[in-house]
Amino acid sequence: MFAALTGLGLSTAAGLNAYIPLLVVGVLANLTDRVKLPDGYAWLSNWGVLAIIAVLLVAEMVLDKVPAVDTVNDAIQTVVRPAAGGVVFSATNAAAELDHSTWMAENPWAGWLLGIVMALAVHTLKATARPVINAGTAGVGAPVVSTAEDAGSLGMSLIAVFLPLLVVVVLLLLALLAWWTFRRVRRLRARRRIRRNPPPG
């Protein structure tokens, strides 16, 4: 169970920011015993690779805080974030040793699939909400929300590794946020349709 919660938490974080959970996993694998990378994922702890990820993170953090540019960035990240979610979920499957679960280790594709789906779901929520926030705040909200998303990605990554049981609580809160966001988007779209096509009379 702990392995699955860790993977879900990290892939959720990847949906907000692809590079933060990758850095967290790689750095912790180097400096602690908390993350043990399975065979085939040693590259994630290579300092050269981590330096490249850090550069990409800086670029992402800058681009994501500029209104309109953030929407283009989200379109590009539609591929990157789910891929990162698959990587971090699979790369931490070694944690399955903690709860003696061998099924995930014997079926690595399942980790990839779960990580991709989770990250894609969170990314979709983020990409859907951002244009609404930009329009509602005349772009002022973009850097604020982006900073909150970066902090959320870092916090979720650390929770996933050190306090995996709390991942359940965070996922429930995220589900409520998704429900609220999509309702808000539907209302705004309905209002725009009415403005464009007012009823006769």
Image (spheres, grey):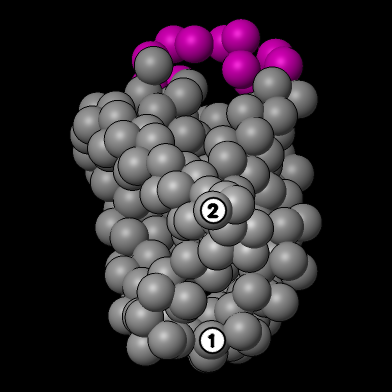
Kindly identify the residue that appears in the image at 73 percent across and 66 percent down: 75
In magenta segment, residue 92: no
Q: Toward the viewer: 48 or 155?
A: 155
Kindly tell me whether residue 199 is visible in this rendering: yes
Amino acid type indicated by mark 2:
Gly
Kindly tell me whether residue 91 is visible in this rendering: no
Instruction: Report x, y in % for residue 14.
Output: 53, 54
Instruction: Report x, y in % for residue 148.
Output: 31, 70
Kindly identify the residue that appears in the image at 61 percent across and 9 percent down: 103
The kind of secondary structure element at disc 2 is loop
Amino acid type indicated by mark 1:
Pro
Q: Mark 1: few, some, or many residues within 10 Å (few <14, many ≥20)? A: many
Instruction: Report x, y in % for residue 160.
Output: 35, 42
Q: Quarter-wise, where is residue 86 in the image?
A: top right
Instruction: Report x, y in % for residue 65.
Output: 48, 85
Give the residues drawn in magenta, as a range. 97-107
Quarter of the picture containing the N terminus is top left
Identify whether 43 is placed above or below 131. Answer: above
Kindly identify the residue that appears in the image at 55 percent across and 31 percent down: 93
The kind of secondary structure element at disc 1 is loop
- Select label 1 or label 2 by which is in front: 2
Q: Could you tell whether 107 is left or right of 100 in the image?
A: right
For disc 1, the marked residue is: 67
Q: Quarter-wise, where is residue 196 in the image?
A: bottom right
For disc 2, the marked residue is: 201
Kindly identify the residue that appears in the image at 69 percent across and 22 percent down: 110
Q: Could you tell whether 76 is left or right of 186 in the image?
A: right
